[in-house]
């Protein structure tokens, strides 16, 4: 079973910012340009898409690069 303690968090680091999973290398990639009548609509659709993508991803399919043995 998937670990259920994974979380969706905002990450900022050099060269990258976006929504990531705390348990694997998954990052949220919006499927396309945001569409909506208003900014609020766009925001709501973005969050819905983000949450659905996060819920449906499988951590085991997004392994983090292994760190060297230090
Ligand atoms: Zn994950």
Image (cartoon, grey):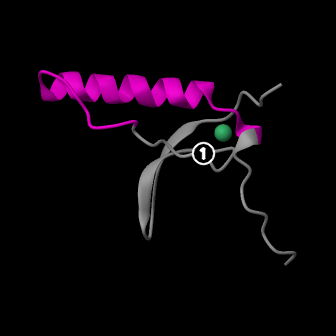
**Residue that lies at the very extreme toward the front in this rendered image:** 32
Who is closer to the viewer here, 7 or 65? 65
Horizontal and vertical percent position of residue 49: 41, 26
Instruction: Residue 43: say if magenta.
Output: yes
In this view, the residue farthest toward the right is 69
Q: Position of residue 17 (x, y in %)?
A: 41, 56
For the point 68% across and 47% down, which residue is it?
24
User: What segment is highlighted magenta in the picture?
Assistant: 31-60
User: Which quadrant: the C terminus?
Assistant: bottom right
Q: Is residue 27 left or right of residue 57?
A: left
Q: Quadrant of ligand 1?
A: top right
Looking at the figure, which quarter contains the N terminus? top right
Q: Residue placed at 20% from the left, 21% from the top?
A: 41
Residue pictured at 44% horizontal, 70% vertical: 14
The location of residue 30, given as percent across then percent down, is: 39, 39
Disc 1 CB within 8 Å of nearest ligand 1 atom: yes
Could you say whether the residue bearing mark 1 is in a helix, strand or loop?
A: loop
Vertical comparison of 54 with 61: above or below:
above
View extreme (bottom): residue: 70
Q: Is residue 32 left or right of residue 70?
A: left
Specify the quadrant of the image occupied by residue 36. top left
Residue 48 x, y percent position in the rendering: 40, 22
On screen, 11 above or below 5? below
62 within the magenta span: no
Q: Find disc 1 in the rendering and name its residue.
A: 26
Viewer-proximal residue among 58 and 67: 58
Instruction: Tell me if 39 is positioned left or right of 43 in this view.
Output: left
Q: On the rendered structure, is 43 left or right of 12?
A: left
What secondary structure predominates along the stretch shown in magenta?
A: helix
């Amino acid at each position: 079973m998937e670990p259920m303690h994974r979380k969706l968090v905002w990450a900022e680091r050099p060269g990258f910012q976006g929504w990531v999973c705390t348990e694997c290398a998954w990052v949220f990639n919006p499927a396309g340009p945001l569409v909506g009548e208003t900014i609020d609509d766009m925001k709501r659709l973005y969050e819905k898409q983000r949450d659905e993508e996060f819920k449906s991803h499988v951590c085991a399919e997004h392994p983090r690069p292994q760190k060297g043995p230090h």
